[in-house]
Image: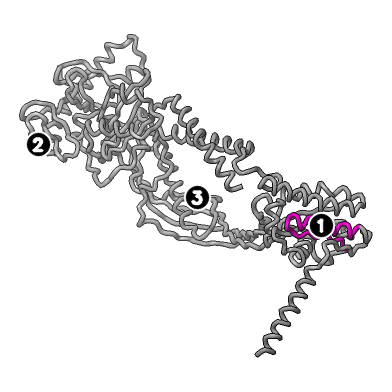
Amino acid sequence: MADSSVSYKCPNCGAPLSFMPGKTTVTCEYCGTEFEVSAIEELFRAKEEMAARAAEAQEAKWETENAGSEWSGDEAKALHAFTCSSCGAELVCDENTMATECVYCGNPTMIPKRFDGMLKPDYVIPFKKTKQDAVNALKEFYKGHMLLPSNFTANNRVEAIQPMYVPFWLFDSKITAQADFRAEKHHVITTPKEIITEISVYSCRRAGTMGFERIPVDGSKKMDDAYMESIEPFNYGELVPFSAAYLTGYLADKYDVDAEACAPRADKRVENSAIEVLESSVEDFDAVQLENAAVVKDVGKVNYAMVPVWILTTRYNDKPYTFMMNGQTGKVVGSLPYDTTKALLYPALCALVLTPIIYFLLLMFT
Amino acid sequence: MLKKFFGVLALIVALSFSTADAAQIKSVTDKAGVLKAEEVELLNQRIRNVEQAHKIKIGVAFVKTVGGRDMVTASNDLLDKNFANGANGGIVLLVAMDKRKYEMSTDRRLREIITDYEGISFLKDAFKSDLSAGNYYGAASNFVDGVDELLTYYEKNGVAYGQRKPGEFDPIAAAVAFVTAVVLSVFIRSVLIGSMSNIHHAMAALDYLKKNTVKLTENRDTFLFMTVKRRARSSGGKRGGGHGGGGHGGGGGSF
């Protein structure tokens, strides 16, 4: 049976190939041979086509075999099996997995069948941060949190560290915005008996045009939107045209939320920012309040890109904690547990120290 | 030369007599005709005793009217003009019969001893009922006794009536301090808990704004209207609304 997956193996020694963070070439970790991305693409294109055809055939067979079995139609649609070309193991992944590694032999594997019927990404931001960078960054992230349970870091073991290319839509837009603000100028006159405040009220109209470039919105249902928005921003100076070679050695998902569905999130951010820009031009006033605003999109363009994210999972008191690191900039985001005893003790200590200080200040100034 | 010397000496003597004459201003003035002559004399005697005992100046004036001036200004003027030269300060009680109003004024020094909040309130309690009842001699007498009592309290305790001695525990301040500290601690707790997560939705996209594309096409400010807010100036501390500035203290009311 033909392989339904393609292992990116070194043409020189046969070892698994990985795209090394921070490099522009694909490197064999074992013999050190470096390959241009275009050369690897060429080399494996034929294999991928063959693997895709094999996967189609296998898929049809799998559906036939499972007709009338315990799998529901939705489950069968969501789960897909493929064969590891390195060790032959039968692996199951979800419908969006484009690249993964074999859980048995660790072989980096692409699933070209998943590239069918979907858009090819326009760009990719290659991984710059290594696994060790991610571990170190997580340790650094723990520091400075006074309420972190003492045994969280002591007994803490990172359960899983996964590098993943997450599908993102990058929205470009040129907009025309118009907003009305109510602004006030305060003039204070002090007499021996009273303080007189003259408040002059103005209506300020501002209109203008502006452009936004590559506002990122993740196209993956699996990835929490708040996490993905928290790891921003990205340095688009390192954005390169997409090549599947960059995905080798990493997990990669294809999008399951299309650009149309993601657009409102980008639109909302553009609208908020446009109003903020217009408001910043209402100068020399003591108070400014938005009355109404209208933002019209003149030009909108969308690109599809794969963005590098390290996903780190740890466990504390049988509860999993997920952290994510921007694979390009190294920014770590996540929610840490807090010690409820410390959360009561520290404020109580604060109250204990502050009470006499405030008491003596009151006596001094009254 | 000798003539010049005697001339200057004569001027100094003349000035001394005129100052001594000014110092002879009576403590009690009754232009409203509400006191008998012997009552005025008794009050003057009583006031002299209190003045000597505490090194202060006390003035009591019953007038038919203060004219166009307000009571605070009139009482402050009376104090500054005639009763401001006491070593420990001065105080006056001015009673205007046409408006049935009274006003007390203290100078900067005596204000520390007879505070606007507790001291003046104590004096009001001492004489106001007699004023209302038409017992003007009793009211003036009680006012002088009240001043004597407040000065004696100060000399004995080292602090003004109604104020705490240095180092004395203040339960109200302690309660305010405790509640403030608890509120601050709850705020600190919420900040500490909030700092455990840096996950948040991005509301804006300013990182992706191309700054050189921002062009304002309309920039118009239109004046709509003006409103005026007036707020009475607080003169700080427990002054009970202030007393016309110039460091004066005091208070008054109707009877």
Tell me which corner region of the image, top left, top right, bottom left or bottom right, holds residue B176: top right
Q: Which residue is tagged 1?
A: B47
Q: Secondary structure at mark 1?
A: helix
Observer-nearest of A165 and B41: B41
Give the amino acid at mark 3.
Ala
Number of on-image labels: 3
Give the amino acid at mark 2.
Glu
Q: Which residue is tagged 3?
A: A294
Q: Quadrant of the N terminus of chain B?
A: bottom right
Would residue A24 be seen by someone viewing this image from the given angle? Answer: yes
Q: Picture coordinates of residue A155 (x, y %)?
A: 31, 21
Crowding near the residue tagged with mark 1, few <14, some 14–19, many ≥20 C-alpha atoms within 10 Å: many
Q: State the predominant SS element of the stretch in magenta.
A: helix
Q: Which residues are magenta?
A: B39-64
> Distance from label 3 to label 1 (Cα)?
79 Å
Q: Which chain is indicated by disc 3?
A: A
